[in-house]
Image (cartoon, helix red, strand yellow):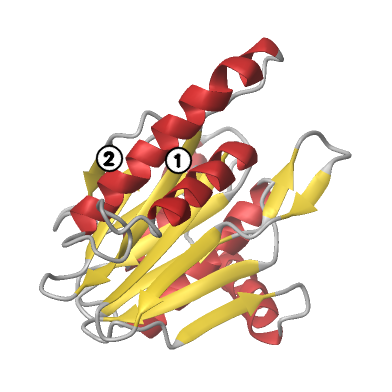
Amino acid sequence: MTYCVAVKLDAGMVFASDSRTNAGIDQISCFKKMRSFVEPGDRSVVVLSSGNLSITQKAINLMEQRARQTDRCNLWNAQSMFDVAQLLGECLREARDQDGVFLAQSNVDSGANFIVGGQIKGEPMRLFLVYAEGNFIEASDDTLFFRIGETKYGKPIIDRVIGHDTPLEDAVKCILVSFDSTMRSNLSVGLPIDLVIYRQDTFCLKLHQRITQDDPYFSQISRRWGEGLRGVFASLPNPEWLNDEPGGSS
């Protein structure tokens, strides 16, 4: 399992992914699930992946191979992020068509998902969620973020904090809290976390941070968020109707 998040704001975009993979409780490894493709001044593209590791790696490798074929649409000549999302979806379908039947023979799920986002010169920033079947949807004014992998635990904080005008710095804090909540509830998600910030119209990725187990800032965020939650919980009033229970407080 994994956890990946990407948000699109007025100021830019934030991408984050964990690095834990597991094929059973005694087979846990670390693999990077974020790839970036940058041509300074022209395009910045970030891809996050979840699901079957061999399928996601093969799909990315197919996309990179096609990038060397200048007679067809590829990463470096695509005119829009829509074209990039379509290219990634095609590569995902091809990988599953080639290997899926053999994985199924061993009852191995070939499902995989991607988040792909960024900006190509001549159009605004765009963000897409690519499903296992290769089709995709785009983030909108009503949907500012996508998550893939273990998505149950980290969503509430993002729902409460993220808006169009959220500063990138606040979005980073929010996403790290989301990861902390997820890791506390599911051991299949874990450090390191890869985090990238893209600022609108820069066409470069100036900040790429890898957050490891001994990262002091993440440790501080985790500790202070936990303390804050416990403090707020302790300050909540008891329901008045409990006083009506036999033996309740008077």
Total marks in image: 2
Q: Position of residue 97 (x, y in %)?
A: 47, 23
Q: Which residue is mark 2?
A: 136
User: Residue 215 versus residue 23: which sits nearer the camera?
Assistant: 23
Above or below, 104 against 216 in this view is: above
Q: Position of residue 105 (x, y in %)?
A: 67, 11
Q: Position of residue 49 (x, y in %)?
A: 50, 50
Is 193 on the left-hand or right-hand side of 242? right
> How many residues crowd mark 1 within 10 Å: few (<14), some (14–19), many (20+)?
many
Instruction: Determine which of the numbered discs, if any, sits on residue 113 in the image.
Output: 1
Q: Residue at 78% across / 79% down in the picture?
A: 214
Distance from disc 1 to disc 2, alpha carbons, whole Å, reads: 10 Å
Q: Position of residue 120 (x, y in %)?
A: 21, 71
Q: Residue at 36% across / 46% down in the picture?
A: 88
> How many residues crowd mark 2 within 10 Å: few (<14), some (14–19), many (20+)?
some
Give the secondary structure at mark 1: strand
Q: Residue at 48% across / 61% down in the picture?
A: 236
Can you see residue 232? no
Looking at the rendering, which quadrant does residue 11 occupy? bottom left
Of the 4 image quadrants, the one containing the N terminus is top right
Q: Residue at 89% across / 39% down in the picture?
A: 26
What's under tag 1, amino acid-wise?
Asn
Question: Nearer the N terminus, badge 1 or badge 2?
Answer: 1
Looking at the rendering, which quadrant does residue 168 occupy? bottom left
Above or below, 11 against 20 in this view is: below
Can you see residue 208? yes
Give the secondary structure at mark 2: strand
Is 48 on the left-hand or right-hand side of 129? right
Looking at the rendering, which quadrant does residue 116 occupy? bottom left
What's under tag 2, amino acid-wise?
Phe
User: Residue 229 versus residue 117: which sits nearer the camera?
Assistant: 117
